[in-house]
Amino acid sequence: MNADVDAVALAESLFDEATRANERRLLVLAGDRGRGYDALESLLEALPVPITGTTVVGPDDRLRCEHLPQANAGELLGTTRDVIAVDAHDELRPNALGKVVGAVDGGGLLILLAPSLETWPDRRGGFDESLAVPPFELDDVTGRFTRRLVETLRVHRGVAIVDLERGRVEADGLTDPAPRSATTAPAPAPPPNCRFPAAAYEACLTADQVDAVAAFESLSEADRAVVLEADRGRGKSSAAGLAAGAFAADGEDVLVTAPAARNARELFDRARELRETLEDGGSTDDDEIGTDSRPIETAAGGSISFREPTAAVAEVGSADVVIVDEAAALPVSTLESLLAADRIAFASTIHGYEGAGRGFSVRFRDRLGESDHAVTDCTLVEPIRYAAGDPVEVWAFRALLLDARPPVEPLVVDADPETVEYRRLEPDELLADERLLREAFGLLVLAHYRTEPNDLARVLDAPNLEVRALLHDGHVVSVALLAREGALPPDIRAMMYEGGRVRGNMLPDVLTSQLRDEAAAEPAGRRVVRIATHHAARSRGLGSHLLECIREEYGDAIDWLGTGFGATPGLLAFWRANGYRTVHVSTTRNDASGEYSALMLAPTSDAGTALHDRHADWFVRRFGSLCTDALDDLEPDVARAVLRSVDADAGPPLELSAHEWRVVAGAAYGPGLFDVDPGPFRALVVRYFVDDPDTVDLTGREERLLVLRALQGRAWETVADRLAYPSAGQCMRALGDACCPLVDHYGTDAALEVRERFAND
Ligand SMILES: CC(=O)SCCNC(=O)CCNC(=O)[C@H](O)C(C)(C)COP(=O)(O)OP(=O)(O)OC[C@H]1O[C@@H](n2cnc3c(N)ncnc32)[C@H](O)[C@@H]1OP(=O)(O)O
Ligand SMILES: Nc1ncnc2c1ncn2[C@@H]1O[C@H](COP(=O)(O)OP(=O)(O)OP(=O)(O)O)[C@@H](O)[C@H]1O
C-alpha cells in the first residue's frame, strides 16, 4: 500500500469534514522524515488550499510555502492559517506547538510530522538537550512528555494517524459530525444609543463581539482602559479592529501595537473593511485585505497606524487611542509604559499562556487597577475562527494542559498547616495521575506569571527538577518546583568563571560569572524555582509550611536553599520570614515581570553559610553605588524591602570619621547641608535598613525620602514632587529630620556633640 496515497486521500476527507463542521482536524504523519515531507508535499498539492495559507514550522525550508523555525512560532500568534505543518523530527518545543495550534482556521488542518509513534518517546531531540542541565547529561532526560503526547494523539477525537513505515492508517480522525444547522443565528443588533456607527456592529459575527465593540465606546472619555480577554479565535482582534475603525471614522488617531505587525493583521483587515463600508458604502478592495498593517487614513482625517512596541511607547502621547493586541505576549514593563496613554485597550488570551506566560493577568492587572484608568472588562466566549467544541482545541488544551486548573475552591478552602500532608510528586506519579498533574500544574499556571507549556515537559522530563506539594484531602493546595543547582566540577566552574554559559544553575551561575566568585558553584543547593499556594488558602502559613518541610527533607544533604524572583515588597517579606536572605539584585529588569530580580539564600551547612556570608557582605558594600547606577529606578519600597531582607550581620560596620559625623549631625540638628557630602549619609542609610533597629522609628515616607535622595541621588525637586512635599526646601528639612533618629542611634561622640550644641540653641 502506498502511504502517500493514503495520506492524501485521508487529508482530503479530513479537510472536507473540517470544512463542513467549521472545525479543525489534526493529521499525524509518523515515520521517516523524508517520507513525511513527500506525503506533506503531495497532500498540499491535492488540497484546495492556496500556498499562501500554508505554513511549515520546522528546521528546513523544504516546501514552497511559508516557513518558520519553531523558535519563531510566535509570529503566528493571532494570525489565521489554513494549514500549519509542524516538523517535530529534530525536536518539539511545547511552546511552539502551543503557539501554532490556535492559528489554524476552522476548516483547516494541523499536520504533525513525527517519528514513528512507538519509538518517538525514546528519542531525544534539541529541546531535550536544553533540559540536560549540568551535572546531568542528555541520557538523563526522560521521554514522559512525548509519551503522554502520543497517548493523547491516540485517544483524542479528530486526530488522524498515518503510519508511513507500515503504510497504513492507524486512525482516520473522522468524527462524522452532525450536519450544521442551515439556519444561522440572526445577525447581532447594535446596542441602543450606541456612539459608534451601526456598521461597526453590523460587521460583528457574534453577540459577544458586539459587546466587545461596545466596551470600546467607553474609550470616548479620558482615563479609560478596556481589557478584552478570550481564548484564541473568539474575535478579539477583529472587535478591536472594528472599534479602531470607528474611532478613525470620527477623525481620531489610533495607534496599534502588538509583538509584531503580523499579529495585528486581523485588526487592520476589519478596520479597513469598516472604512470601505462607511466611506464608499461598497465592498473592500480585496487587494488591501491581508496586507499586514499598512496605515489606514479616513476621510474624516483619522488614522490607524501600527508601531512596534518600543516605538509605540515612544509615541504613546501623540495618539488619541492606543490598542495593544496580543498583550499577553508583551513584557509587563512595556505594558506599564504604555499606560501613559489615557485611552487604551488591551486584547489578551486567557488560556494562551503560551505567549510570555501569564504576566498580563498575574502581574499587570494589579498595576492597571492601581493606575488612574477606569477599567472596562469584557470576555468573549463564543468561538469564531472555528466551531465550539473543536476537537483540535480540546486536544491541545489536554496535551499541553493549557486549561489546567487548581482544585475548585471548596476542596481546599479548609486547608491549613495542620490538615495538609507534605508530598514529593514524582514525575511517574504525575504521569499516571492526570488529576494530580492538572492540579499541581494548574496551580503553577494560575498563580505564576512565568509558567508555560515548556514547563510541563520540564516537570515530566528534566532530571534536575523536583516537585513538592502540600495536599489537603488529596488535593494540591501548595506546590513548589525545585531545581538542583551547584555541586559542579572544577572544569565547569572554571568555564563559567571565564565567561562560558552553563544551562540551568541560575544561582551559582550569577554568583560565579557576574559576581566573580569561582567557588560559588561548589556547594550543592536547591533553588525554589516557583512556589504557589491556592488563592483560596493563602496567608494561612501554607507557603511557609511547605518551605519548612522542604528544609527538613533536605536537611544537611545540601548546602543551601535559594530562590530568585521578580522582587516586590510582599514577596521579599515572605521569603525573609522564611529565613531566606538577599545576596543580589539583578541590574536589569526582567522582561516578563518588569521587575528587578532578587536572589536569596538560606544556608543549610557551613559551606552554604560561607557562600551566603561573603555574598551578603559584598552586596551591602556595593548596594549604595548600584543605587545611583543600574538600580537608580528601583522602586523605593522595593529598595527598603531588599535591604531589610539582607542578613543584619552582613556588610562592614558603620565607620564614619568624626568630621563625617559632624556633617551628618549638622544636617540633622544644625544648619549643615546634605548636598556637600552625600557619601556618609548613604553609608548610614544602608546600615540603618540592613540593621532595622527597633529604636529608630521612621515613617514610610521618610524612608522613601532616604532612598530617593540619599541612595538614588534624585534631585530635590523630583523627590519633593514624588513624595508630595510642598517644596524642595521642605523636602531638604524633612531629610534632616529623618536623619535625627539615625544620629541618635548610631552617632559617635562627635555627632552627639553637634546634637547637644544645636539642641540647646
Ligand atoms: C520563586 C517564586 O516563585 S516567587 C513567587 C511566589 N509566588 C507567587 O507570587 C504566586 C502567587 N502567590 C502565592 O501563591 C502565595 O502568596 C505565596 C506562595 C507567595 C505565599 O503563600 P502563602 O501560603 O500565602 O504563605 P504564608 O501564609 O506562609 O505567608 C504569607 C505571607 O507572606 C507575605 N506575602 C506573600 N506574598 C505576598 C504578596 N504578594 N504581597 C504581600 N505580602 C505577601 C505576607 O507577609 C503574607 O502574610 P499576610 O497575608 O498575613 O500579610
Ligand atoms: N467580525 C468579523 N468579521 C469577519 N471575520 C471575523 C470577524 N470576527 C472574527 N473574524 C474571523 O475569525 C477569526 C478569529 O478572529 P480574531 O483573530 O479577531 O480572533 P482573536 O480572538 O483575536 O484570535 P487570536 O487569539 O488567535 O488572536 C479570524 O480569521 C477573523 O478573520
Image: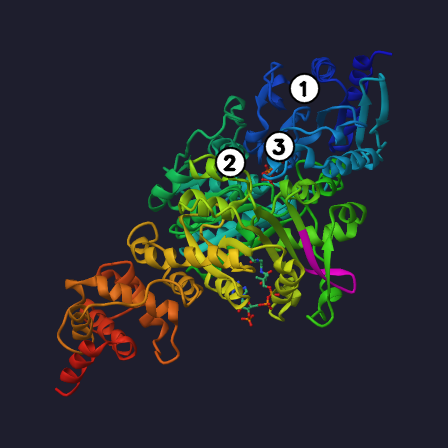
What residue would you read off at disc 3? 129
Vertically, is 294 above or below 657?
above
Q: Image point 71% across, 72% down: which residue? A: 418
Q: Is mark 1 on a helix, strand or loop?
A: loop
Distance from label 2 to label 3 (Cα)? Answer: 20 Å
Label 3 Cα crowd, 10 Å radius (few <14 / some 14-19 / many 20+):
some
Amino acid tagged 1: Val
Q: Residue 526 carries which label?
A: none
**Residue 28 falls left or right of residue 621:** right
Determine whether the beta carbon of the residue marked 1 sits less than 8 angstroms from the nearest atom of ligand 2: no
Determine whether the beta carbon of the residue marked 3 sits less than 8 angstroms from the nearest atom of ligand 1: no
Distance from label 3 to label 1 (Cα)? Answer: 36 Å
Q: Image point 62% across, 70% down: which residue? A: 541
Distance from label 1 to label 2 (Cα)? Answer: 55 Å
Q: In which quarter of the image is residue 61?
A: top right
What residue would you read off at disc 2? 491
**Residue 521 falls left or right of residue 103:** left
Q: Position of residue 51 (x, y in %)?
A: 62, 17
**Residue 126 falls left or right of residue 474:** left
Magenta segment, which residues? 467-478
Q: Can residue 716 be seen in this view?
A: no
Label whose residue precedes the other's in the sequence (2 or 3)? 3
Q: Residue 49 carries which label?
A: 1
Q: Is mark 2 on a helix, strand or loop?
A: helix
Label whose residue precedes the other's in the sequence (3 or 1)? 1
- Please name whichever residue, 213 or 455, is drawn nearer the observer in this view of the structure: 455
